[in-house]
């Protein structure tokens, strides 16, 4: 495809931000986005958009295997981390623009071990669904209640969708028996 020149991570981020700002139906959408992305023409921005749409359709059709995400990261952590990457601008009394950025460091998730999962299942059997604090305190001492709740959510989704899947390409920690 012509214009399939490499995009830097910075250009990609500017492109994505442009898509959010200039939604579908905005007049001259791609030329406005191209103005935000240095070194890219309107044609290149439009081709990049078409490639993105094609990739999304492939993912939705199930032709692309999604990565196995870590169990102790929940949607709030992801949204918070994403928001922390943006620089907030404000205008002070003198009329100059100042920028601040959150210096919050995002922790990298550590996958659950088979033993932690077995301890989780024991706690689930004894304490029942919902007592994540008790399961964390008495059974899976290496995990916080939030991590236990997140793991439980993924575990229940996994066991409820298991019959619908014919063959799994990768094993899951959720397949570990008690």
Image (cartoon, grey):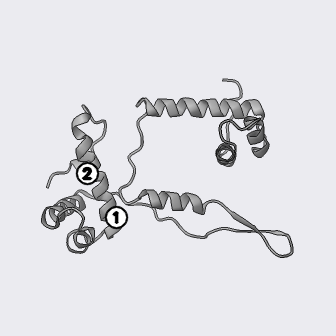
Quarter of the figure with residue 52: top right
Query: The N terminus appears in which quarter of the rendering?
Result: top right
Residue 173 in sight here: no
Location of residue 74 in the rendering, given as x and y in whole percent from the top left corner:
41, 58
Please, which residue is most extreme toward the top here?
1
Question: Is residue 121 placed above or below 136 in the rendered structure?
Answer: above
Q: Residue at x 40, y 50 (%)?
A: 69
Nearer to the camera, 26 or 178: 26
Location of residue 119 in the rendering, given as x and y in whole percent from the top left corner:
19, 63
Quarter of the figure with residue 167: top left
Location of residue 17 in the rendering, given as x and y in whole percent from the top left corner:
66, 48
Quarter of the figure with residue 166: top left
Nearer to the camera, 53 or 12: 53
Report whether 175 appears left or right of 48: left
Please, which residue is most extreme toward the right here?
94
Residue 127 in sight here: yes
Callout 2 environment at 10 Å: few (<14), some (14 to 19), or many (20+)? few
Disc 1, SS = helix
Report whether 65 appears left or right of 104: left
Give the number of the mark in front: 2 or 1: 2
What is the spatial separation of the Cα atoms under label 2 and label 1, in whole angstroms? 14 Å
Q: Which residue does the numbered mark 2 point to in the structure image?
A: 156
Disc 2, SS = helix
Query: The C terminus appears in which quarter of the rendering?
Result: bottom left
* Badge 2 vs badge 1, beta-carbon distance below 8 Å: no
Q: Which residue is drawn at 51% across and 65% down?
A: 106
Nearer to the camera, 21 or 170: 21
Callout 1 environment at 10 Å: few (<14), some (14 to 19), or many (20+)? many
Location of residue 123 in the rendering, given as x and y in whole percent from the top left corner:
17, 65
Q: Which residue does the numbered mark 1 point to in the structure image?
A: 147
Question: Number of callouts in the render?
Answer: 2
């Amino acid at each position: 495809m012509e214009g399939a020149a490499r995009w830097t991570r910075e250009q990609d981020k500017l492109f994505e931000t442009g898509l959010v700002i200039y939604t579908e139906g905005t007049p001259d959408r791609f030329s406005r986005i191209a103005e935000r992305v240095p070194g890219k023409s309107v044609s290149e921005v439009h081709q990049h958009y078409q490639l993105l749409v094609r990739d999304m359709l492939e993912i939705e059709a199930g032709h692309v295997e999604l990565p196995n995400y870590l169990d102790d990261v929940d949607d709030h952590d992801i949204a918070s981390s994403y928001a922390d990457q943006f620089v907030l601008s404000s205008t002070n009394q003198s009329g100059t623009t100042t920028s601040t950025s959150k210096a919050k460091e995002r922790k990298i998730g550590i996958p659950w071990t088979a033993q932690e999962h077995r301890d989780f299942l024991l706690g689930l059997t004894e304490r029942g669904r919902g007592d994540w604090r008790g399961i964390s305190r008495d059974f899976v001492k290496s995990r916080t209640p939030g991590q236990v709740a997140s793991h439980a959510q993924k575990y229940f989704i996994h066991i409820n969708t298991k019959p619908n899947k014919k063959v799994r390409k990768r094993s899951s920690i959720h397949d570990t028996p008690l």
